[in-house]
Amino acid sequence: MIATPDRTPLPREFFDRPVLEVAPDLLGRVLVRSTSDGPIALRLTEVEAYDGPNDPGSHAYRGRTPRNEVMFGPPGHVYVYFTYGMWFCMNLVCGPEGRASAVLLRAGEIVEGAELARTRRLSARNDKELAKGPARLATALGVDRALNGTDACASGDTPLRILAGTPVPTDQVSSGPRTGVAGDGAVHPWRFWITNDPTVSPYRAHVPRRRRT
């Protein structure tokens, strides 16, 4: 018998833990994005941990900047960044304030509002591809920099919250290197995903960009 997902919002204490504890524990949780067009709910199936000052792969590794300011704030807030001049990616800040650690939301299964998500992801060949990858996830949910700094643990009406959902047993969680991370940060097996889930994105190692001659 499949358990009914718990729709209780996750408290701030959930995120106020080391990033390597929070990241795998986010799998199976449900992210609810509310917009004027309607809500979309997504079950998280793949995430990556970024551990601030201890992690060369983190945006916060070299300290605080206007771009990463939210990462240094209270846990449970949303950090959104723009990448490759065309895509947004969404993270959840965790750990104590000032630590600057966060979890990148890489993929998920749309469990509510698929019709709306399809209008935003016209290139998706099927519903499994709607949020298969961090940029696709953000696009399907209608996430941009306007959500940067949003408190996902706030009470009342909020554009984004995380529900308890159905946590994934540890024996169903896989881990490995993070996608596209180069240098010293490439060795960390800090990507976590639900084993054999069809919505998980494929792993791709970092490929250095070639300079045009």
Image (cartoon, rainbow, N blue to C red):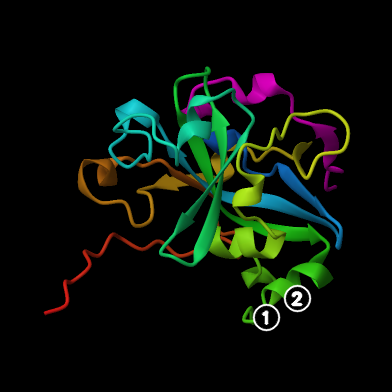
Work out whether 2 lies above or below 140.
Answer: above
Element on which disc 1 rests: loop
Q: Is 87 one of the magenta-colored residues?
A: no
Residue that carries the numbered disc 1 in the rendered image: 122
Q: Amino acid at mark 2?
A: Thr
Work out whether 82 lies above or below 154.
Answer: below
Q: Tell me, yes or no, whether the two marked residues, 2 and 1, touch with CB atoms within 8 Å.
A: yes
Q: Amino acid at mark 1?
A: Leu
Tell me, for residue 205, which label it has, or none: none
State the residue at coordinates (64%, 78%). 124
Q: Is 16 one of the magenta-colored residues?
A: yes
Query: What are the residue bounds of the magenta stretch?
Result: 1-21
Q: Position of residue 188 (x, y in %)?
A: 31, 40
Residue that carries the numbered disc 2 in the rendered image: 119
Q: Residue 165: which quarter of the image?
A: top right
State the residue at coordinates (60%, 34%). 25
State the residue at coordinates (45%, 41%). 67
